[in-house]
Image (cartoon, grey):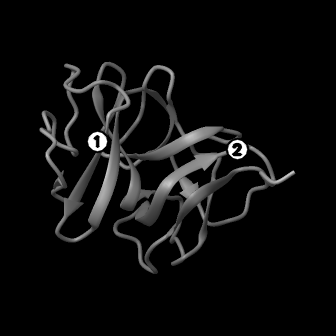
Amino acid sequence: MTWTPAGNFLLNQAIAERSTTKKHDLGTIVQCKDETYGSGEFIYVDGVASCAIRNWVTINGDDGSITRLAANATGPCGVAMSTLTASYYGWVQIAGKAIGSCLTLFADNARVYITGTAGSVDDTSVAGDYVWNAKGASTTTVDSGVAEFELHRPFTADRVSIIS
């Protein structure tokens, strides 16, 4: 994938790259386009230990840090566009068609659930660990352990229902 800015934004760090030098303000959101995957939105973040490319992460809006998505997580989430380990800065996809980590073959249009494997999701229901505003986007996996997803600023709430 080659993501390029969709507007008048100077991209000092490519979407698929990581850097030990902060090249944008944490929390910066940019819209980009790709010839194959169309439009997408990305947020600039500070990495965390063990975060691999395509891992699902939870985003901390207070300080721009991320945590690998894990059971009972809460808050906004997305897919890491590079290996964002500690001491690295990079981009997380929060909207558009993304390639993310999953445990098994992921069904097209299936709901997304957090798993016991940090950074990975599955389409098997887990009470309270539903990822809102995300769904499977292909009947085939892109590669072993990853699949296509449609993201629309996904988030988790650690509740069976967010409607009281």
Q: Is residue 81 left or right of residue 76?
A: left
Q: Residue at x 21, y 60 (%)?
A: 33
Q: Which mark is residue 82?
A: 1
Q: Quadrant of residue 157?
A: top right
User: Residue 99 at x, y = what percent?
Assistant: 37, 60
Badge 1 crowding class, 10 Å Cα cut-off, few under 14, some 14 to 19, many 20 or more, is many
Q: Which mark is residue 157?
A: 2
Q: Residue at x 56, y 55 (%)?
A: 121
Secondary element type, mark 2:
loop
Three-letter residue code for mark 1: Ser
Residue 112 seen from this side:
yes
Q: Is residue 83 left or right of residue 154?
A: left
Tell me the distance, in whole angstroms, between the alpha carbons under discs 2 and 1. 25 Å
Badge 2 crowding class, 10 Å Cα cut-off, few under 14, some 14 to 19, many 20 or more, is some
Which image quarter is the N terminus in? Answer: bottom left
Q: Residue at x 31, y 19 (%)?
A: 87
User: Residue 22 at x, y = what percent?
Assistant: 23, 21
Above-or-below relation of 86 to 155: above
Above-or-below relation of 150 to 157: below
Whichever of labels 2 and 1 marks the residue nearer the N terminus, that label is 1
Q: Is residue 97 left or right of residue 1?
A: right
Q: How many marks?
A: 2
Q: Nearer the viewer, residue 21 or 161?
A: 161
Q: Is residue 78 left or right of residue 81?
A: right
User: Residue 108 at x, y = what percent?
Assistant: 51, 78
Three-letter residue code for mark 2: Ala
